[in-house]
Image (cartoon, rainbow, N blue to C red):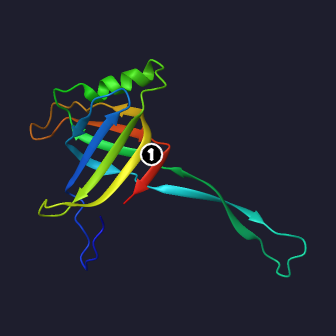
Amino acid sequence: MAVTRDDPYGPFNFLVTISPESGGEFRGGFSDCSGLNTEITYADYREGTEPFNRPRKIPLMYKSGDVTLKRGLIAALDLWQWVSQVRSGNMLARATVVIQLRSEDSAGVVATWTLTRARPSKWTGPTLAAKGASDVAMEELVLVSEDIAYE
């Protein structure tokens, strides 16, 4: 639940939970989450008898943007198995994805975004380079969803 305050929240404390419709649940220790958005399309409309010479904007439909998640590659195949289900044509490989922004002291959730009927659209594996021992192997997952809710 959003709370009124003067300082903005830091973007560094969030939790992602993916709940496939087929059952189970996995939580990701993701380092990045981007693309939370919605876009509304409009049509221009003007009656011939209107006294002003401009169209009205009539809302048509909205769509949710693609959400990108990044995490360090770990010894878990949960994301890859989900991607594989979609690649094999499983139309029911949808999931509810809940992204929660937590307060700095981790005392509670301050904002929640819910992606409805989400599916993976792109998986990118790590860049492998033998030049830096301090780098982390990262994987990236891009999700499409039919709807997004914010509370």
Q: Residue at x 44, y 22 (%)?
A: 87
* For residue 36, above or below residue 96: below
The residue under label 1 is which amino acid type?
A: Asp
The quadrant the N terminus occupies is: bottom left
Position of residue 79 measured from the top left corner of the image (x, y, whole percent): 29, 30
Position of residue 132 measured from the top left corner of the image (x, y, whole percent): 13, 38
* For residue 46, above or below residue 28: below
Farthest residue, direction left? 133
Q: Residue at x 26, y 27 (%)?
A: 78
Q: Residue at x 15, y 64 (%)?
A: 104
* For residue 126, above or below residue 40: above
Q: Label 1's element?
A: loop
Q: Is residue 72 left or right of residue 113?
A: left
Q: Residue at x 38, y 49 (%)?
A: 114
Farthest residue, direction top? 88
Disc 1 target residue: 66
Position of residue 84 measured from the top left corner of the image (x, y, whole percent): 37, 21
The quadrant the C terminus occupies is: bottom left
